[in-house]
Image: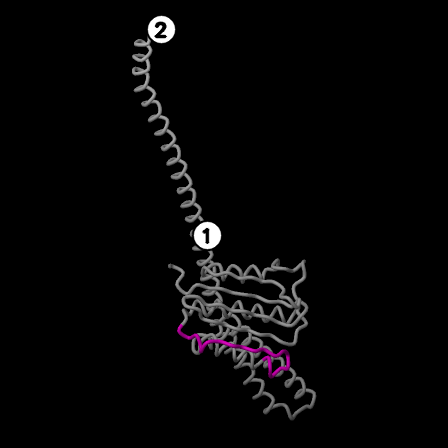
């Protein structure tokens, strides 16, 4: 091939090579953009799915609390009233007919004692279903009352440290925290063989943190986070965008750490 012809061929080929290169770069760019868009859509779908699950969880918890409140109200208004009236009638029968027979008087007193015991149990269950004190006085005052009752019973020593009364917190958040703390206390009483509990709450900017510890035997591998109570606590905390860690500390005793955003929308 003549030198002139060779140069002409190269000059002719160069524009085509440039076009092919531009096309290749364009295809690579479009492919990269396609992958980015696909990844972004997948993330959006995952976020929507997660948000949908959280919405369902919140709705479920809210429905449970509404049902608890209804049952507690019905127990207090209907069953409580019926038991109180029954007790009054028994007292009246004791005064009118109790002197006729010592055995009759003893039987009436036994029945009244059972009625009073049932009335007390009903009040306790109603309070556990929906503590009226929580709405009136807030989380900290309610926890202090629970602690006083446990101290009076000689059951366990509980130390509580908190920044003020936290009554300005959202009522739903206070109710969730109350449920979680009561579940933790009940588990310590039932399983930990502990005689001391420490509960500390802190407000840090836009976040509430809490640390719960006892001096018991700690979690076993079989029970670590597997019970329905644990799942219920985790579900409640997750529903408000928080985290809950259940573990044994360096001494082998149990501890729970909570972290809850006070502005979950930000």
Residue 251 in the image, given as x and y percentages of width and height: 66, 68
Look at the picture and state if 68 lies above or below 145. above
Left or right of residue 52: residue 245: right
The residue tagged with tag 1: helix, strand or loop? helix
Q: CA distance from mark 1 to mark 2?
A: 73 Å
Residue 194 in the image, given as x and y percentages of width and height: 66, 73
Using the rendered view, name the quadrant where residue 241 is placed: bottom left
Q: What residue lies at 39% left-to-right and 31% top-to-bottom?
A: 28
Look at the picture and state if 229 lies above or below 107. above
- The quarter in which the N terminus is drawn is top left
In depth, the one of 119 and 26 nearer the eye is: 26
The residue identified by callout 2 is 1
Using the rendered view, name the quadrant where residue 20 is placed: top left
In depth, the one of 95 and 248 nearer the eye is: 248
Please report the bounds of the magenta region as a residue range. 150-168
Q: What residue lies at 30% left-to-right and 16% top-to-bottom?
A: 11
Quick check: can you spot residue 77? no
Crowding near the residue tagged with mark 1, few <14, some 14–19, many ≥20 C-alpha atoms within 10 Å:
few
Residue 173 in the image, given as x and y percentages of width and height: 44, 67
Left or right of residue 18: residue 240: right
Q: Earlier in the sequence, mark 1 or mark 2?
A: 2
The residue identified by callout 1 is 53
The residue tagged with tag 2: helix, strand or loop? loop
**Residue at the limit of the structure toward the right, as seen here:** 103
**Residue at the limit of the structure toward the bottom, as seen here:** 99
Queried whether the magenta region covers residue 152, the answer comes back as: yes
């Amino acid at each position: 091939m003549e030198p002139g012809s060779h140069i002409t061929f190269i000059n002719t080929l160069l524009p085509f090579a440039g076009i092919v290169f531009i096309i290749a770069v364009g295809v690579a760019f479009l492919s990269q953009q396609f992958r980015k868009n696909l990844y972004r859509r997948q993330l959006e779908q995952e976020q929507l799915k997660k948000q949908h699950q959280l919405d369902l969880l919140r709705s479920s918890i809210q429905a449970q609390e509404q049902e608890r409140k209804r049952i507690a109200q019905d127990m207090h208004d209907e069953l409580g009233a019926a038991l109180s009236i029954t007790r009054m009638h028994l007292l009246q029968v004791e005064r009118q007919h109790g002197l006729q027979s010592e055995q009759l008087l003893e039987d009436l007193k036994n029945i009244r004692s059972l009625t009073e015991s049932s009335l007390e149990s009903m009040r306790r269950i109603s309070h556990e279903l929906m503590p009226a004190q929580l709405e009136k006085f807030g989380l900290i005052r309610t926890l202090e009352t629970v602690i006083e009752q446990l101290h009076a019973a000689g059951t366990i020593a509980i130390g509580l440290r908190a920044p003020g009364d936290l009554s300005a917190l959202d009522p739903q958040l206070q109710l969730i925290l109350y449920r979680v703390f009561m579940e933790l206390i009940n588990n310590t009483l039932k399983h930990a063989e502990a005689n001391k509990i420490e509960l500390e709450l802190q407000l840090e900017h836009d976040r509430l943190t809490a640390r719960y510890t006892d001096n018991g035997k700690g979690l076993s591998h079989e029970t670590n986070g597997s019970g329905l109570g644990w799942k219920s606590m985790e579900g409640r905390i997750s529903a408000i965008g928080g985290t809950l860690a259940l573990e044994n500390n360096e001494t082998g005793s149990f501890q729970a750490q909570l972290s809850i955003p006070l502005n979950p929308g930000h």
